[in-house]
Amino acid sequence: MDADAVVVGSGPNGLVAAVTLARAGRRVLLLEAADRFGGGLRSGELTLPGRVHDFGATVMAMALASPAFRGLELKGVEFVHPPVPAAHPLDGRPAVLVHRDPVRTAAGLGRDARAWLATVGATARAGLPLVELLLKPLGPWGGVPPAAFAAAAGFGAAALLPATTFARRAFRTTEARAVIAGMAAHSVLDLRSPVSAGYGLLLASLAHLVGWPLVRGGSQVLADALVAELRALGGEAVTGHRVRRLAEVRAPVVVLDVTPRQLLAMADLPSAYRRRLERYRYGPGVFKLDWALDGPVPWRDPAVAGAGTVHLGGTLEEIALSEAETSRGRVSPRPYVLVVQPYAADPTRGGHTLWAYCHVPNGSRADLTGAVEAQIERYAPGFRERVLARHAMGPAELEAFDPNLVGGDISGGLSSLAQFLRRPVWSPAPWRTPLPGVFLCSAATPPGGGAHGMGGWQAARLALRP
Ligand SMILES: Cc1cc2nc3c(=O)[nH]c(=O)nc-3n(C[C@H](O)[C@H](O)[C@H](O)COP(=O)(O)OP(=O)(O)OC[C@H]3O[C@@H](n4cnc5c(N)ncnc54)[C@H](O)[C@@H]3O)c2cc1C
């Protein structure tokens, strides 16, 4: 195919870039190294025949809130909601539940009910325009109502704080502080670092605003729908094609769904840009487990059964300690564990499948199976007896599965304040590289990690500019 544009890599960002370019009339060729499209959206059998596991992303709050995906109106993709977006079990007391309804959530937080509504609730009330602004912090801002900028200023004051500071200032109860810690830990940051509160606030407010849904049948369905759309627009999509050198790809526009380390290996870059990319930092990795179970997890608090996502690790102090250890390069013996139980929302995955991960130092070779399962047993005694089969992936296996997961980093690079502003370089258009017609679109560009497709949308938008 004589392509106008070649997209390298088919994660959500590459797929959105490819479809956006094709919708603008470009002849697009999409090249994917793996044997399936989707990157972090892939699903497949990891444990037993017939069991559908998401290799990466399951929770589609970002996709649902993202202007990049909302604009695509894909056919055949059904978002299904668990009864409860997220739960946070605690020792010796009822689990905290984050419901779609902020008032119902607040009612479970006792003395912190009003504080929840004034912080997380207020962020959710600011609505999708605020989320849109946060997902495209560098613009374009056409169509964003002025009220969203005022809301962003209010959000920013709290969001810039470390999660530990924010949680202690805003809340008095163990429950509310723990919930914010569990949310903020998605950032994979030391919770004493700036902006970690922002991730917690945004994710918790998305539970109220759009919910934390899953794709019925697995996230692969979303990736396949994007590929089908590309092909319907005349584009070509190829798996099993790893681009090793940029020179192999010839087209007026090349959009790369890769992170800086890969770009450095692929291309001869001007030395100033090369040095800037060499300074780009990756964050901690993850150790992920997938299980086939013979029934639901036997949570001590039965209310947790309805939650799509469960945050384990106890109090703010415990979770902050575990994340601080990881950031210092040490393996935490009692890690914060993020559990996803797709069966709470989607009965079509061949039975009770479950996944969980904990954070580990970048590139760690430690086997955290015992530590992760111990955290689940802590809140669900008898869990191990439900396990029919398990599959583990540490940083090395994750990177082999997707080269963008450098050292097991699932966010495409550290999500620090510095790298929020410099992702991967400080520029009003960081998707543009100094090579003519070559753009970056991965999670190593704004707004960072997550299945939102915004990097792809931004890169395609720039590439389409006359
Ligand atoms: C275990 C795990 C759980 C997660 N959970 C969630 C979640 O619940 N919700 C959420 O929003 N996000 C989640 N994420 C994060 C999310 O999946 C990523 O942020 C997102 O997929 C990044 O998209 P991307 O397009 O930048 O890159 P990726 O999805 O990583 O895709 C990059 C693609 O490019 C291909 N590629 C790379 N180099 C080349 C090359 N040289 N030639 C050809 N192809 C190449 C790769 O094979 C891959 O398919 C999770 C990630 C992981 C790993």
Image: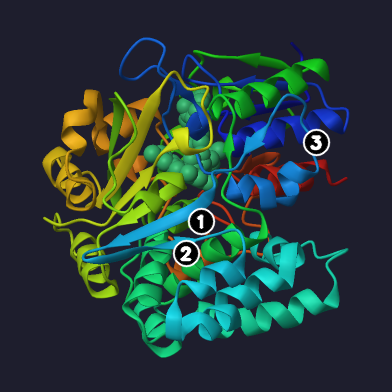
Q: Position of residue 316 (x, y in %)?
A: 29, 73
For the residue pair 204 and 94, the one nearer the viewer reads as 94
The answer to whether residue 303 is left or right of residue 202 is left
Q: Residues within 10 Å of mark 3 (few under 14, many from 20)?
A: few
Real-space Cα separation, disc 1 to disc 2, in angstroms = 7 Å
Residue type at mark 3 is Glu
Residue 237 placement: quadrant = top right
Mark identifier at residue 419: 2
The residue closer to the viewer here, 188 or 81, is: 81
Tags 1 and 2 in contact by the CB under 8 Å rule? yes
Please state which of residues 268 and 365 is positioned toward the viewer in this rendering: 365
Single out the mark in the foreground, 2 or 3: 3
Circle 3 or circle 1, nearest the eye:
3
Is residue 234 in view from this perspective? no
Element under disc 3 = loop
Q: Earlier in the sequence, mark 2 or mark 3?
A: 3
Residue 34 position within the rendered picture, expressed as x and y whole percent measured from the top left: 46, 19
On-image quarter of the N terminus: top right
Pointer 3: what residue?
73
Report, in whole angstroms, how far the alpha carbon at label 3 lies from the one at label 1.
Answer: 30 Å
Name the quadrant containing residue 188: bottom left
Nearest to N terminus: mark 3 or mark 1: 3
Residue 340 vs residue 428: left or right? Answer: left
Residue 377 pos. (x, y %)? 18, 46
Residue 329: horizontal and vertical position, in percent? Answer: 17, 59
Which residue carries the number 1 mark? 424
* Residue type, numbered disc 2: Gln
Residue 168, numbered circle = none
